[in-house]
Structure formats: C-alpha cells, structure tokens
Image (spheres, rainbow, N blue to C red):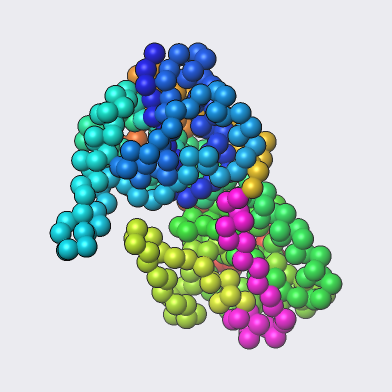
Amino acid sequence: MVRVGVLTSGGDCPGLNAVIRAVVRRGERHWGDTLVGFHDGWEGVIEGRWQELDVEAMRGYLSRGGTMLGTSRVHPWMASDAGADGSDGPDNLARARATLRDLALDALIVIGGEGSLATAHRAHVEGLVPVVGVPKTIDNDIPCTEQTFGFDTAVAIATDAIDRLHTTAESHDRVMVVEVMGRHVGHIATWAGMAGGATVTLVPEHPFDIDRVADIVRTRHERGRYASIVVVAEGARPVPGTMDVAEPEVDRFGHQRLGGIGHAVASELEVRTGFDTRVTVLGHVQRGGTPTAHDRVLSSRYGVAAIDAVHEGGLGDMVALQAGVITRVPLDQVMGHLKGVDDDLWDTANALFEARLDDPM
C-alpha cells in the first residue's frame, strides 16, 4: 500500500483517460494504494494543484478522449518567469520538490511522449521522485515499444478522411493532398496512406523530389485515372534544392510549429501537372474524440502494468509492448532517439504506390 501520483504531460492523445482509469482501478482494488492526479502535468506539481483519484471518480472516462487531468508542456527545469520588477521568478524545481514532499509520494506515473519521458527520467535519476513512464503519442515514435496508444485512433481518423476524399476527388477529377500529423516520423502517413489507397505518401524519413511526385500523378492520369490522393506528413521535407519551403517557427518550448507543407506540395503539383489540386489539413482532429477499441485496450494494459511496476521493482522503467506482451524497459534506453518508419514497412508502402518514389523518372 503506497501513495502514487499520476500526471499527463505534452500533447493530448486518445486513450489518456483509459490509462488513468486502469492505474486507479488496479491500484485501489488490488494493491490498496492511494492515488492522486496532478492537474495540467508538471505544472500541477509545481503549483500544488492536484486531486484524489478513486474508482468512483473515474467512472465514465474509458471512452472519453483528452485527459480529465489536463496537460501542459511545462516541467520543473524550465526557466521561471521573471517578476514584474525584473527579479527572478519562483524556483520551479524547488516548488515541485515541496509539493512532492508534502504529499509524501512513493512514486509518480508519468504518461507522455518523447519530451515528457525525458523529463520523467531526469526526475528519477536526480532524485526528485521515483517514476514509471507510460508511452503516449499519436506519432508512434517512442523507441523500445511496438506501439503507443493513440496511434491507432489517429490512423483510423486519417484513413476515414482519405476514404471520403476519394469520392469527391473522383467526382471532380482532382488531386487531393491530405496533410496528416507526423513531426519527425511518418507512421501515421504511411499507415493511413496504405489503408486509404493513396497514390503516393511523403514522410520525414525520406525527403521527396516534387518532380518525381508530379510525374507519378501525371502518369496515373494519362492512364485514365483522373483522381489522385497524395498523403503528406506535416514534417515531410523536399530534397534540398528541389522546392522552396519556409522554415518553420519555433515555440517557447523549442518545438517547431509545423504545418503548411500540404499547401506547398499542392501548389507545386498544380503548376507542374496542370491538374486541379486541393488540400485538406487534418491537424488536431487526429488527436481528439473517442479512442478506438484497440487504443482503449492498449491504454488499459499500460495502466495496469504501470501501477504493477511501482510494486514490482520497476521504478525508473517505461512500460512497453514487445511481441504482443506488455513488459518494461529502463527509461535510459528510450532517451535520445526516435522510432522511424522501418525499411520493410516503407518498401511495402512503395510497392502499393502508383510507382516507387525512389525510381528514376
């Protein structure tokens, strides 16, 4: 019987509530734990904003998207805001430490993506609080786990959009460019492109030649197929020197504000082919709404495994899916790199395109 905190950090994701619910149900009923949830991620730890969590409080949340605790990208090692008189702001790390000390937590379960898990690892190794990590991101880019929850929902949403765009593209003999999320990796684009029968898919792992893309679309239309779907991950970039694209802005957390590559690709395709080309940017719709059954189950499995890890010597670990089994890996093995689209999957996707992107024109 221990006291365990839970927080969700970084971007929201379908399945977050299912993880929290599983942690609480398993922790309270099996281990007899006391659970507390921090509001708005680490910001709640810093500011002392939290609530007690029990089975009754989690009723009805299994199928709800978003996170009932709220989330943010703030963490204890961020520079504090300066005071109005120019003096240093409050020490975020000291405030976080005081909150954790006052609550007498034995462990903290951090549900987050790449940056959030890096912060969790730092909190563990620097003695702020013992942690267990749960991998969360629709991008599916966390190493050491086959799949993150939220990914299946995002792919399903993108695939449904592509299915709908096929019919309107065919009705008007148009090229449809669909921009999906995928900052550094193209898992969503690759899976949705394959599932939705895209003409071609562009991903961050493989810079594209816009002339080659235009040639593929043009050849398809010459064969009498007058509608094409081009799926573009938001982080996709052209081969240097082949197409002008604006450098993305950077937000206060150091993240690039991506988006707009779909419009750039559409404009270039229309100029090169002469075909009427339209753009659909799915954006945050991929993050919202009801999680799929797959994501609800995966989230629940992760939640149970996370609270079990607290009791079974798994502090400092991340729960992970490997060969269909939920296991644990040390957080230090997860840090510093991302899981991109593997060569085998990319070769399969290319085999289904109208023509391979890497073939000569």
- From the viewer's perspective, tell me whether residue 281 is left or right of residue 316: right
- From the viewer's perspective, tell me whether residue 160 is left or right of residue 281: right
Please tell me in which quadrant of the rendered image residue 315 appears.
top left
x 25%, y 57%: residue: 81
- Give above or below for 301 relative to 141: above
- Give above or below for 51 relative to 285: above
x and y percentages locating residue 98 in the rendered image: 24, 34
- Give above or below for 104 relative to 199: above
x and y percentages locating residue 162 in the rendered image: 71, 60
x 47%, y 81%: residue: 244
Nearest the eye: 226 or 334? 334
x and y percentages locating residue 293 in the rendered image: 67, 36
Q: Does the magenta stretch include residue 268?
A: yes
Given the current orientation, which residue lies at the most extreme left position?
A: 87
Q: Can residue 124 be seen in this view?
A: no
x 17%, y 63%: residue: 85
> Where does the magenta region start and end?
267-288
Where the C terminus falls, by quadrant?
bottom right
Nearest the eye: 54 or 128? 54
x and y percentages locating residue 283 in the rendered image: 58, 61
